[in-house]
Amino acid sequence: MTGAPLASIRFAQHALSTRFEDLTADAIGQAKVFILDTIGVGIAGSTASGAREIGAAAAGWGAGDEATLWGRSERAPATTAAMINGFQIHCQEYDCVHERAVLHPLATLLPGLLAYCDRVGGVSGRDLITAAAVGVDVSAGLGIASRSAMRFFRPATAGGFGTVAGVGRLMQLDETAMCSAFGLQYAQSSGTLQPHVEGSVALPLQVGLNSRAAVQACDLARAGIIGPSDVFEGLYGYLRLFEGEWDLAPVFAGFGRDWRIAELSHKPYPAGRATHAGIEAILRLRAERPFTLDELDSVTIVGPPVTARLCSRPDMPEPTQNYAQLCMSYIAAKVLLRGKIDLAHYRGAERTDAQTHEIAAKVRMLSDGGSDPNALVPVTTTIRLKNGEELSWKCEQMLASPARRLTREQHLTKFRRCWEFAAAPLSDAARDQLIRMIDDLETVRDIREVTRLLAPV
């Protein structure tokens, strides 16, 4: 593309030239793991706060049955399905994360890919895996390139560009059209952190909006609409305005070698990733030294600045689901009271339970004042008992990160639990068939064989 800046071309070339055979066995394996995981949390999101209302509103935006709405009986146009399914994936803070990029790449990417696969038919499992891998490379690459503290909601903003890369590849856009699609995505990019601060349902909605925008951007580019070219590095480009300081050189150097999809972390707990070290610490310390809630004096969790920035919010007596999922005090209280944190703990009377909020008052999360704007570890948790005894544990690497991956049974236990929360009940037979199909995804000839299992027959 004559005159196009380096970043747009490099991202486009990587997305279009990568072959399934280029992927490592680990990248392929982890792609399958996280495709299944993402589908699971998306199905569970069909009954989360806001899901019914968003679906009802979207039903008036145009008719069509191109694509599956996960966990629901209805179908929708592909762009609407991408938006709704994207919302459902991220609305419970249970979707996978690239820790170094501070990004949930598949929340935006996978609903766009599957909606497009539903629309056109005939997309193979090998094609889906490859599109997922290059899409994560682009979105996570943007997060990794950043040298500034996150000031926009990166899962939505950077996630949209990753979705363009993946969908554009499936559409077989040429390099010129792909660069235009990046520009057209930028014209629609959204992702403020204000909903995060307020615990608003608009936070996960932004993920869905950018997934929809990416499908639209690719459609527009394929139709010949020319988008702005200096999308990433220009005077008013994404990196300058949304991130501040950046270095893309290491990202480009890793193309074809460092498959970012193999660097993803599971969410073993349905809560903001920045809370996970504290959750694990409480479970570990209480198992090693059992104590009653009457013995508890305080819990102090100290970690890098981004952990406190994201999850040190004060407890509220009547939090929204989205607020509670990112409140360390509330989450720690549930773990101390219930012995775990579950999707059900953000629903109904659980959110206003008086004992939960009494315990939450004893929990605080603090910054260690570190200089890395994206680091999530180390995190030190100290539990003080009323007799003066202190229990402490330091997390250097969070559970379910690439260095501490979940076992297959842990992964499937989470998936099966998510399956139970579908708005339109799904059968165990369909669940088990889906697991088998994703296990052998590279042999699937048409992804519609997968998506038909995500709604009741």
Image: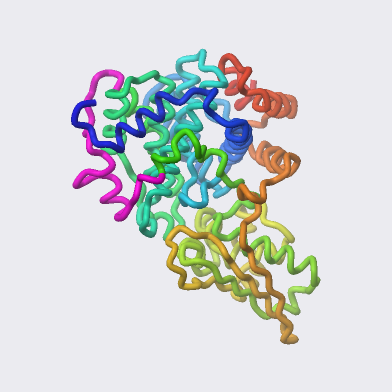
Span highlighted in magenta in the image: 221-250
Asked which quadrant contains residue 282, the reply is bottom right
Coordinates of residue 367 in the picture (x, y in percent): 49, 71
Coordinates of residue 399 in the picture (x, y in percent): 65, 54
Find out whether residue 281 is within the magenta segment: no
Coordinates of residue 278 in the picture (x, y in percent): 62, 64
* Residue at the bottom extreme of this rendering: 388
Give me the residue at 44% from left, 21% from top.
170
Give me the residue at 50% from left, 31% from top.
132
Front-most of residues 190 and 378: 378
As drawn, 351 above or below 79: below
On the question of residue 98 being in view, the answer is yes
Left or right of 118? Residue 391 is right
Coordinates of residue 308 in the picture (x, y in percent): 49, 66
On the question of residue 343 being in view, the answer is no
Asked which quadrant contains residue 279, the reply is bottom right
